[in-house]
Image (tube, rainbow, N blue to C red):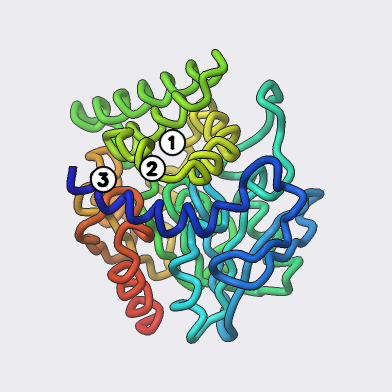
Amino acid sequence: MKALKFTTLLLLLIGFLGCKTQNPTLQEKSQTETLAVDRPKSVNVRGETIHYIEKGNGEPIILIHGAIGDYNAWALQMDTLALNHRAIAISRRYAWPNQQPGPDVSFDCTVALHAKDIVGFMEEMKISSAHLIGHSYGAMIALRTTIDHPSKVKSLVLGEPGVETMLSGTVKGDSLINDFRTNFDVAVSLYKRGKHEEAVRQFLITVLGSDEVYDVVPQAVRDGWLQNLVEGICIAETQDLASISHEELSQIKAPVLLIKGQNSPAYLATASDSLNLVLPNSELRLLPNASHGLQGENPSEFNKLVVKFLNDN
């Protein structure tokens, strides 16, 4: 599949170089070098140690990764964004190398919780306002942060947030939601039966349409997915993708760049199309030769779109 070829490039570049430190036996070496910067840093946010990487100077940009990821998801953006900005990629609560809950522990992974963490992080870092760039669940978090704290957000770049309220209420939309949730339910079931590798494969099927890429990437990449899987399962169980309403979205005044992949699943692509109609100050751009991996599958074009948007706003 054409999309998977580019997804494979994503994982070979980011996964092998960035996630190679995610092997569970190496957790204590959280200060090892990363692809994007010399060393990660950490700050206490609302009782949790949150790790991040940063580079550059200027207006701050905070990059928020999606499920089963961490700050390495933005390794191919850091150098470009740091040319004119202070680029900060965080590992969200529960993501490597932060403390992670055990597989049988119940915990809060809602969009609202993570949005509070973003605000708390900004306060600890003495950042009064920032541009937010979010991917997938990270884009949902960026939206909630903007809704609850509009003065703290200068602009938004959103990579395919799966906002269910953009789809529900029509036969097609409800069908897409049902299929998406059914796939996630399969992942949860596999995880609870101790079949963690199969659960990761099911996540790939849900967001990419195939798990073929799992067999192509280095073991270090698969280890990274497995290490961050616990929050992905929580997200799938919580089903918080319908927590943002039309009315809330229509009140967002900040400039918004929506980016969707040329080969992305209909659920995610349609949600972006609908968001563009609801958000008052948005623009939608199609990223060629990419599926839901976006910033890693076609980093050059992704970066160009983001830089132009930031320059215009």
Residue at left 24%, top 25%?
175
Q: Are marks 1 and 2 in contact (CB under 8 Å)?
A: yes
Of mark 3 and mark 1, the one earlier in the sequence is 3
> Where residue 166 appears, x then y in whole percent?
31, 42
Inter-mark Cα distance, 3 to 1: 28 Å
For marks 1 and 2 on the same chain, the one whose residue lies earlier in the sequence: 2
Q: Quadrant of the N terminus?
A: top left
Secondary element at tag 1 = loop
Identity of the residue drawn at 75% across and 61% down: 42
Q: Is residue 267 above or below residue 84?
A: above
**Residue for point 39% across, 70% down:** 255
Percent of width and height locating residue 209: 27, 35
- Residue beneath disc 2: 163
Quadrant location, the C terminus: bottom left
- Considering depth in this image, is 260 or 163 the residue closer to the camera? 260
Q: Is residue 262 left or right of 137 when viewed as pictured?
A: left
Real-space Cα distance between discs 3 and 2?
A: 24 Å
User: Would you call the spot at circle 1 few (<14 residues within 10 Å), some (14-19), or many (20 or more)?
Assistant: some
In the rendered image, is residue 165 in sight? no
Mark carried by residue 242:
1
